[in-house]
Amino acid sequence: MENRHAVTDRDVVKHLIKRLARIDASDGWRADLNPAQRAALDYLSRANRFSRQPSHLASYLGSTRGTVSQTLKSLAAKGYVEAVTPGSDKRTIAYQLTESGRKLATTSDLLSESLDQLSAGSLRDIATQLRHVLGAAIHTNRQKPFGLCKDCTYFQPKNGNGHCRLLNEELGVFERDQICHEQLPRSAGASATSA
């Protein structure tokens, strides 16, 4: 006997999000990358200098540290990322994009091209609703929001860029608009502003 039930708006939205995610992942098999490597490049292109360690990437992607380490090693072997020591502790390793990694990370993809067909108002409306959905999922799953620095409780505007009060660090020119693993939303409405 066939299992029939009324399809709700929630069911439709869930299906659409999952289908878009699958299409986006299948589009990730371009150049010499797989979808996991493309996701890592995307994250590193958006993360501030305090959020580029393998553990941060694993937390953001919901993956294991071992899987992320292998992904980063592959990207380094291909010349898209390089390992750096971000502070005085030489045991800490972070990754940053190389010039070729930056170029690849900013290459247009199918989802971006599809979104370009929408009006600015439509994009803002969709982004607002998806932020709410993502924020609820992050809260329910007890994950970090990885939001933008400028939307953080610890952010203090200063000299046109900003200052992180938690880390007591001046932010670089673009860091206020990058995602951070330490981000604590100023309000519930500001959570998960990055995705």
Image (spheres, rainbow, N blue to C red):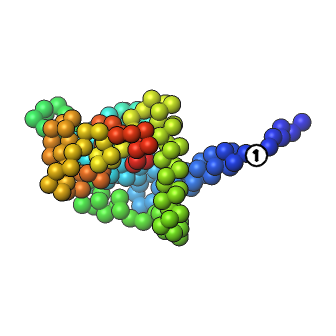
- From the viewer's perspective, tell me whether residue 57 is left or right of residue 27: left
Rendered location of residue 152, percent (x, y): 31, 42
Res 174 visible:
yes
- From the viewer's perspective, tell me whether residue 2 is left or right of residue 71: right
Rendered location of residue 115, percent (x, y): 51, 64
Nearest the camera: 128 or 14?
128
The local secondary structure at tag 1 comes to: loop
Q: Is residue 165 above or below residue 109?
A: above
Q: Amino acid at mark 1?
A: Val
- From the viewer's perspective, tell me whether residue 134 is left or right of residue 162: right
Q: Is residue 122 above or below residue 73?
A: below
Q: Is residue 29 above or below residue 6?
A: below
Rendered location of residue 104, percent (x, y): 35, 61
Residue at figure coordinates x 51%, y 37% from the top left: 136
Rendered location of residue 4, percent (x, y): 83, 41
Residue at figure coordinates x 47%, y 40% from the top left: 135
Quadrant (top left/top right/bottom left/bottom right) for the N terminus: top right
Res 61 visible:
no
